[in-house]
Image (cartoon, coloured by chain):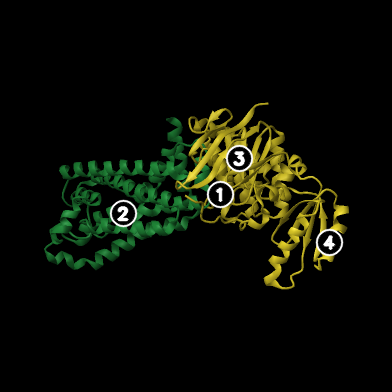
Chain colours: A green, B yellow
Amino acid sequence: MLDGLWDTWYTLVRYLRTFVHNPFWMLILLIQPLVWLVLFTQLFQSITTLGFTSGSYVQFFAPGLIVMLAVFNANALAFRLLNDINYGVLVKMIATPVNRYSLIVGGLLYIAVTWVLQVFVVLIVSFLMGARVATGVGGVLMTFLIVSLLGIGLTGLVAAIAVTMKRPEPVVLIANLITLPLMFLSSILIPAYLTPQWIQDAMKFNPVNYAILAVRPMFLTGFDWTAIGQALVVCGVFALVAIFVETAAFRRFGG
Amino acid sequence: MTNIVETYNLTKIYNKTIRAVDDISIEIQEGEIFGLLGPNGAGKTTTIHMLATITRPTSGSARVGGYDVLREPRKVRAITGYSAQEAGVDEYSSGREYLTLFGHYYHLDNRTIRSRVDELLELLELTDAADRLVATYSGGMRKRLEIGTALMHRPQLLVVDEPTLGLDIQTRVRIWDYIRALNKDGMSILLTTHYLEETDKLCDRVAIVDHGRVVALGTPDELKGEIHGDVVSLTLPVEEPDQHAQTIEKVRQLLSAQPFVKDVQPTAEALNIYVDQGGVAVPQILRLLEASGLTVGEIALARPSLDDVFLKYTGRKIREEKGKAVGARAAWIRRPR
């Protein structure tokens, strides 16, 4: 058990150390959410004239972007794993007594850390652009929890695909096939009532939508405990399923 | 003498049809350097993957250090070091960081890790490059670092997949020296190779593997001893390309019928003729060919090599099947699934 925790820690440190060796990557990682924030708020500015209740679009979009970043980061771990597979690193790790769950959870935590850093950038810049978090620090922490679970679920699934396929090309295709619809079939970009009925129906099966429904009120009005409860259950189950599926993929990896 | 490795009818079948490893039963003694020799696709890598608990056998079983690879994989991992064919190194870390990570994965304490890392960097002559990113390492340095990760926990058994594949001759000789030194300190070593020279120079015993089966097993000298006498290698000049194959077949039949010839094996560019006494056979062969109106290209006499042993058991020369060398950058894994 203790070994497992240490294994997780050293796996996380190994991934994070990449940024020490490549500070430029870190810079790109932090600039990326800024680009989204500026582009989307400019592009969809006029949506507010359709009778938006939320005031400015940045106020509406900032929580959406925070959830979106988790979706966009979903294939980041998959590519690190593919690299490790390609260079014969993963097969070597599997031949050591390292805890299998630690290899997975360490990687997922790494993605969560990069995502949290990006969220800080979004929070600071959207604050400067006039957006406020209605529920303060508590709301931010709850957001971290819900969206981390969502991110772990998405990242774990794509990583499982990568470990199974062992090649990058199908992973890119499949990851886009999964993540982009998940984003569009949610109210990240646009409030649900402005979308067709079938999309609103589809949203009910989308963990991304549960996350945004819980997170957005925390930024705009206050805690919506029903939405938060649903999001925690849906995203929590999703994360557990993903860890299970990824572990199964790891176990099959060597054949 | 106890056995460090024992396999019992070890078999791996991929996709229900591809018998990558087909009923292999071998015993490797403690303190031995044991080689699995065979062409690409013979099942060497799959065999050692099963012993290193990376791949699960379809049937049969294996024990490493007395532990069953399926029932006690963690115990097997703790006493086994595995060095991969694709120089398995992380380009994004330094050599020191990479070795340290494996120390942690083997659950060693920090002090042991620090001293082992220094020790291994020294042994593998990587001290100067220790804090540089692996991305800047040459192929030979990567392979040395890679072997280093498998040695962090001082394993009882070191499993090395193609220790010198694609490396230049100086580096190969150096890696052979490391392997010998480790073995001298009591480490048992199992390696795969398709370099005959490597088996000849390094291994106490060799198993020749072909199509997932062990076709011959013994010390290099024993195996060579099975081919009595000498080998005469004969090439014929290509006069009419479309008839060349027929000419070779004609010569083969002609020579096979001679009482002094024990066997004739055609290879890609020559005929290998196995005889008791080369000195007597060569003039006889030349006279025979002359009498039949055939011209001789080149004729050479040699002592049997492992290559001839391989040819005898598989009907092929090992070098004809040599895959492309994998250098600093590993190829995408293309093993059959």
Identify the secondary structure beneath mark 2: helix
Say whether marks 1 and 2 touch (CB < 8 Å): no
Tell me whether circle 1 and circle 4 mark residues in contact (CB < 8 Å): no
* Gap in angstroms between the C-alphas marked 1 and 3: 16 Å
The numbered disc on residue B288 is 4
The residue at the point 48 percent across, 53 percent down is A83
In this rendering, position of residue A58 left or right of residue B316: left
Q: Which marked residue is nearer to the observer: mark 1 or mark 4? A: 4
Determine whether A123 is above or below A105 in the image: below
Q: Which residue is mark 2?
A: A71
Compute the Cα span from label 4 to label 2.
79 Å
Labels 1 and 4: the sequence-earlier one: 1
Judging depth in this view, the residue of A251 and B323 nearest the camera is: B323
In the image, which is nearer the foreground, mark 4 or mark 2? 4
Q: Which mark is residue B89?
A: 1
Choose mark 1 or mark 3, whichever is in front: 3
Q: Nearer the viewer, residue B176 or B230?
A: B230
Q: Chain of mark 2?
A: A
At label 1, which amino acid type do we have? Val
Examine the rendering and report whether any part of residue A20 can be seen.
Answer: no
Residue located beneath label 3 in the image = B159
Kind of residue at disc 3: Val
Do the residues under discs 2 and 3 have CB atoms within 8 angstroms?
no
Percent position of residue B1, x then y: 68, 26
**Helix, strand or loop at mark 1:** loop
Discs 1, 4: same chain = yes
